[in-house]
Image: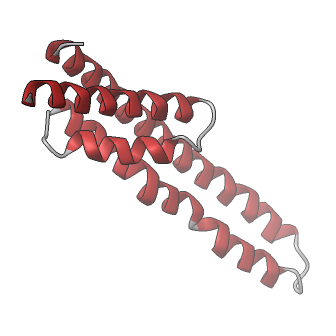
Amino acid sequence: MNSLQLDGHKKVLGILYVVSAVLTITGMILLKAILSIVFSFAFDEADPGDRKVVEMILSLVQFLPYLIIIFISIPTLIAGIGLLTRQQWAPLFALIIGCLKLFSFPIGTAIGVYAIWIYAADQKLAAVTRN
């Protein structure tokens, strides 16, 4: 594989990262809205003694979408933008994000394997050009 083909693969990976981050952010915002609606109905129907339990569960579940956005989606978006703008740090950061995406079966796993393959090809090409 030559440098031009590898740049094309990095661009595709950058686009995949940006699209997956945007979809995850959108999904988490929708999940937050749905959970708010469901818990508001549950809170209205709950007995006065059960309202404290519903409030506690709501306070815990309310932050889950934000945590996913902060710790998964934003780094993925940063890695994708870094790959698209050809930043020097982006391939290593994309590898780290790709390893984390391996746990998100099946699409995240495919993206993670693709990221690892691109990083390995990049390192192989760098070793060949150094010699």
What percent of the width, then of the height, locates residue 103? 59, 44
What percent of the width, then of the height, locates residue 27? 55, 42
Residue at 44% across, 59% down: 71
Residue 57 vs residue 73, the one in the foreground: 73
- The answer, for residue 25, to whether it is visible in the render is no
In the rendered image, the quadrant that contains the N terminus is top left
- The answer, for residue 90, to whether it is visible in the render is yes
What percent of the width, then of the height, locates residue 3? 15, 18
Residue 79 vs residue 50, the one in the foreground: 79
Classify 15 as above or below 93.
above
What percent of the width, then of the height, locates residue 15? 32, 27
Residue at 43% across, 27% down: 114
**In the image: residue 52, left or right of residue 123:** right
Classify 41 as above or below 89.
below
**In the image: residue 65, left or right of residue 71:** right
Classify 35 as above or below 44.
above
- The number of numbered discs placed on residues in the rendered structure image is 0
